[in-house]
Structure formats: C-alpha cells, structure tokens
Image (cartoon, helix red, strand yellow):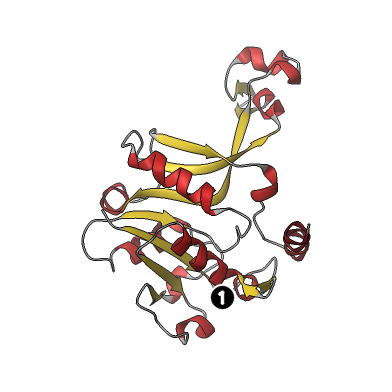
Amino acid sequence: MDLIAIVPVRAGSKGLPGKNLCKLAGVPLWERAVEQGRAAGASQVLVSTDAAEILAAPVTADMSVLKRPDALCRDETPMAPVLIHALQSLPGPARVVLLQATSPLRSTGDIRQAINLHETGRFDLVKTVTPTNPAVLKYGTMDGDRFEPMREPAFCFSNRQSLPPVMRPNGAAYVFDKDWFLENQGFVTDSIGAVVMPEGRSLDIDTEADFLRAEAELAS
C-alpha cells in the first residue's frame, strides 16, 4: 500500500499570523513538514492549502499541491473535512500520515514508529502522544449538580504520585488508511494506537513564544 503524507497548511492564523510560512532555522514550517514526510518514506506528499505562496510553488514528482476551498479555511474549521477533501483527490487505496506543519520538532523516527504500529493492523488510527500531568484524573464533568469523575472515582482522592501515567495528543503525526477515514468520516474510533514522544519534540507552534521555543530547541 502506498504511503501518502498530507500536510495541511492554512494561510491564516490568529496566534501567529502566517505561522505556517514562517522560517524556522531558514526553512518554512510547511517545507519542513514536506521534507519530514519524504524522509519517513512517503511516495507522495500532498499539501492542502489556500496560501498563494505555496499554490505558486513548483510541483515535483513526489509533491503536489491541492487548493483548499475557502469554506475549509476558517479558524473554526475542524481537521476532518479538510482531510476528507484531500483524500477524495487521491486515486486508489493508501496509508496516510498526517503531518501538521506546526509540529516541526518531531523526528523521522517518531513518524516511522507511528507508521510501523499502524502497519501491524491492530488499530484503525495511530497518533503520537506525550506524557502530561496525571492530576487530570482527579477531574470530572458536571451533570446538573452531580460530579461525574473523569475515570475512576478513587482517582479523585489519590495522591498524584500514585496515579497512572496520562498522555496527551501532541498533534505531531496521525496514521490511518484512506478508505477507512472516508468511510468513518473522521478520526473518532475506539481502536487507537499511540507512540509516545518526549516533551522536547512535542511542541505545537501556535504563538510567537512557541516559535521562539522551537528556535531555541533547534539551537541547543
């Protein structure tokens, strides 16, 4: 099955205007994601974008650019319909790795681990995660004036040190089959595999401060 990397790149951004086009260590974030897809073994990298600069970029044998409709370029647009639009342009079956341009510190090894885990056939979806504070297991939701524990009631009264490890999605990579995603119409499934990445490679750039942190990480 062909491996296709999809890099979604929206021109607009509130936190850091034009962030996907910003140069990190001399390389625009979107180009860095394209190179990471190539390095991970993708036979084709598809960039979904409304950015004029990218739409005018030369197309190569292993990289194509798809113009994203204006309706899919709003701040509130979720990722699923963006991917569905991109996947519908691809011929034949494919294994897909989603690489967001705002996660520039992931390594080729991180991406390959996610791909390899998906190739086992054990999961519909594989995503990358990073450890976070397990104290969230003490939290819950409200049903009227009733507190509903997030997981097990005992966790609400446990010492943080005794709580099990908790992982948060870091957005660095998602892997799935094209046909599965189109049939499922999104990411939601109870069959999810995960690859753990360290905090240092899990930065997701949303603000100028995040960008400066990424520069500092690359310089260290």
Q: Please give the name of the residue rendered at 59% of the width and 53% of the height, measured from the top-left corner.
A: 106
Q: Residue at x 65, y 50 (%)?
A: 201
Question: Left of 176 or right of it: where is 53?
Answer: right
Residue 97 lies, in percent from the top left, at 41, 54
Counting every numbered tag in the picture gives 1
Task: Name which residue lies at 57% across and 22% down.
Answer: 151
Asked which quadrant contains residue 205, the reply is bottom right
Task: Give the farthest residue toward the left.
Answer: 92
Give the x, y percent position of residue 85: 34, 65
> Looking at the picture, how far across and down is residue 164, in whole percent?
63, 21
Q: Nearer the viewer, residue 64 or 76?
A: 64
Where residue 38 appears, as percent x and y from the top left, is 44, 64
Which residue is drawn at the image coordinates 40% and 82% (left, top)?
Answer: 59
For badge 1, the amino acid type reads Ala
Q: Is residue 188 left or right of residue 153?
A: left
User: For this rendering, which residue is in front, 206 or 96?
Assistant: 96
Judge whether 159 appears above or below 9 on screen. above
Which of the 4 image quarters holds residue 81?
Answer: bottom left
Q: Is residue 69 visible?
A: yes
Instruction: Assign a secondary structure to mark 1.
Output: loop
- Left or right, 117 with reference to 76: left
Decide which of 37, 19 is in the foreground and name it. 37
- Against 17, residue 217 (above or below) is above
Query: Which residue is the site of mark 1?
Result: 11
